Image (cartoon, grey):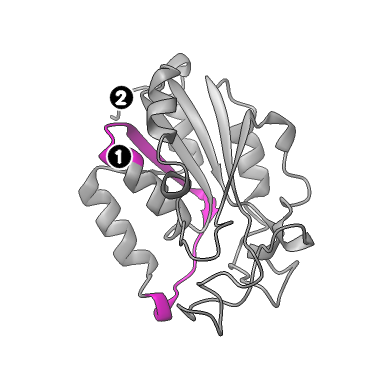
Amino acid sequence: MSELLQPGASSLLVVDVQRGFTDLCPKELPVPGGREIVPNINRLLEMPWARIDASQDWHPPDHRSFFGQRDNLYPPHCIMNTPGADFLPGLRTERFHTIWRKGYDRDFEAYALTAQHPAFAEFLRACGIATVVVCGIATNICCFYVARDLRRAGFRVLLVEDASAGIDVPTAHLFQQQTKEEGQRLGIEYVTMPALQRLTK
């Protein structure tokens, strides 16, 4: 059985749970099941974490990753100061301690908040955090990249699959199964809500 979580040394990271990644904004980048994960994330938000962080895509309209721009990978999504950038309705955002915006530089790709905020890992360490539980959108993109970076920085990292939603993006060579296999090789623990709850007893 996996080691139990220590509440005083464990944090929750909610990744990009925004309207632009759901069918509320169908012309943006809807991820299957994006809205359906909100209840499970809210259950996670009720747990006694040492701190709760959230990331938020906050793109300019001409971000390099958008169709017609330099990388030409994704439809425009989560554009700053538009409804697509808002967090999903019903998400208990009042529980967030800090919101870390990312992707706001037109010429810089930032799947993970650790790319835009490279001192994030050291900040968590200074807060006494040893374990980070990750959830959100998309499992195999922004969730994975921040989980990977935190794992490489020495944290225990758990990714909650039924509080996350993923999508294959062939144009960017991002596939859910391949990404999970890579994450497991790195030591990321892929868990479900019931398994996580057993680790908090």
Whether residue 6 appears in this view of the structure is no
Q: Is residue 46 left or right of residue 130?
A: right
Residue 178: % across, % down = 30, 66
Residue 55: % across, % down = 57, 45
Q: Amino acid at mark 1?
A: Arg
Q: Residues within 10 Å of mark 2 (few under 14, many from 20)?
A: few
Q: Magenta part of the protein: which range?
A: 150-172
Q: Is residue 155 rendered magenta in the image?
A: yes
Quarter assignment of residue 82: bottom right
Residue under label 2, please give it: 3
Counting the numbered discs, the total is 2
Residue under label 1, please give it: 151
Looking at the rendered image, the disc whose residue lies closer to the viewer, 2 or 1, is 1
Q: As rendered, which of 28 and 79 lies closer to the eye? A: 79
- Please tell me which residue is depicted at 24% across the width and 42% down the height of the picture: 187
Residue 62: % across, % down = 61, 73
Quarter assignment of residue 126: top left
Q: Is residue 27 rendered magenta in the image?
A: no
Q: Is residue 167 left or right of residue 19?
A: left
